């Protein structure tokens, strides 16, 4: 006989996108949940999502039978992260085919920020990835004006005062330093509005360009701007585990290469917009660095690669 797959009722409620796991537990404790006609108040009770009838506040729980989809999209600059823009600007949804139009972006990148953007139809995963209490790790690379000193790095890492309060401790590395600008990597667990730009501005280094290179361990890994790929089942599981605070980073060595999709903007009118509104191509190679890196600058392999790219 096939084994019946049961799951905690709180988890099923969260999976349906109705509430976070914690809030679902509160709903159960408050007597708002019934399974097969019986109100439950006990935590940890399991149910079979296919055969048991779960009702919340009198409404049957709708559990989708299809597996949750998570897309990794390389957001180009000058694209809105919203599903719709009243101002008529292009949004990330314009880059996705019809079958993925029901997905929603997880969090937000500024209009002028590029990089990793996840889209999903999984309400619980969205909550785990965006709620401050879970603190999903986000890694940004910012090209900033001026040279960044070790003292500034320390200041950023300790936290800087912004108009909506001090920032939490974070990790900062100078990846490359040139005469008039620097490439800085910041790893944050917060996600406030324009946070990276505001932090760097606050320490006297306005941002020229900003890219998110990783979100909760999901990296671009060569995915070109404007393209997306569907995360594999194992990757979604690993992602979920990471944000639930349990384990592991996806191992690049063991992961098979999934197919990629070129996501074209949908409408002709939009595709023929002025060049400055089109998705940015790959970042431009700048002129070579004119100075040796200061002794405090970290030079991991990645920084060396970036420098090599700058040199063309
Ligand atoms: N911080 C910013 O300043 N902008 C983003 O888009 C993301 C983080």
Image (spheres, rainbow, N blue to C red):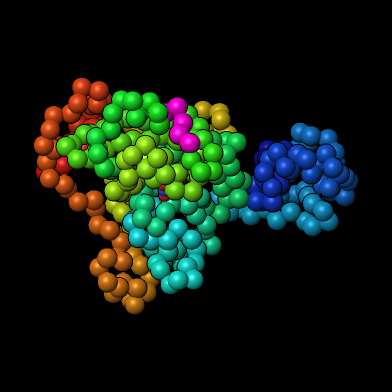
**Residue 196: horizontal and vertical position, in percent?**
41, 42
Does 147 appear above or below 195? above
- 68 in the magenta segment: no
Hey, which quadrant is residue 147 in on the image?
Answer: top left
How many marks do you count on the picture? Answer: 0
Task: Give the residues drawn in magenta, as a range.
Answer: 157-161
Which residue is at 29% across, 48% downward? 208
| Residue 25 spot, x, y in % from top left | 76, 39
Residue at left 28%, top 33%?
A: 148
Q: Nearer the viewer, residue 287 or 198?
A: 198
Q: Residue 90: x percent and y percent?
A: 40, 67
Specify the quadrant that holds the C terminus.
top left
Point 65% across, 47% down: residue: 15
Looking at the image, the residue that sits furthest to the right is: 38
Q: Is residue 278 above or below residue 164?
A: below
Q: Residue furthest top?
A: 295
């Amino acid at each position: 006989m096939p084994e019946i797959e049961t799951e905690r009722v709180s988890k099923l409620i969260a999976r349906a996108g109705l509430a976070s796991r914690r809030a679902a537990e509160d709903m159960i404790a408050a007597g708002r949940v019934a399974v097969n006609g019986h109100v439950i108040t006990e935590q940890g009770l399991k149910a079979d999502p296919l055969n048991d009838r779960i009702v919340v506040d009198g409404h049957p729980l709708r559990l989708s039978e299809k597996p949750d989809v998570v897309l990794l999209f390389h957001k180009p600059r000058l694209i809105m992260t919203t599903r719709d823009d009243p101002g008529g600007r292009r949004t990330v949804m314009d880059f996705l085919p019809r079958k993925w139009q029901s997905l929603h972006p997880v969090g937000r990148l500024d209009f002028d920020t590029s990089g990793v953007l996840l889209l999903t139809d999984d309400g619980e995963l969205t909550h785990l990835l965006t709620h401050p209490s879970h603190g999903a790790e986000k890694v940004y690379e910012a090209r900033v004006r001026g040279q960044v000193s070790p003292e500034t790095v320390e200041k950023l890492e300790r936290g800087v005062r912004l108009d909506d309060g001090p920032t939490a401790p974070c990790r900062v590395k100078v990846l490359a330093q040139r005469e008039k600008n620097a490439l800085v990597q910041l790893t944050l667990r917060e996600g406030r509005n324009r946070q990276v730009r505001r932090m760097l501005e606050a320490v006297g280094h306005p941002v020229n360009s900003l890219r998110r290179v990783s979100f909760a361990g999901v990296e671009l890994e060569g995915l070109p701007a404007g393209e997306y790929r569907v995360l594999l089942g194992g990757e979604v599981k690993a992602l979920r585990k990471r944000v639930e605070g349990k384990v592991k980073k996806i191992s690049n060595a063991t992961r098979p290469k999934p197919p990629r999709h070129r996501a074209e903007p949908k409408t002709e009118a939009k595709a023929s917009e002025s060049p400055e509104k089109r998705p940015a191509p790959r970042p431009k190679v700048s002129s070579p660095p004119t100075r040796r890196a200061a002794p405090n600058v970290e030079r991991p392999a990645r920084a060396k690669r970036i420098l090599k790219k700058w040199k063309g």
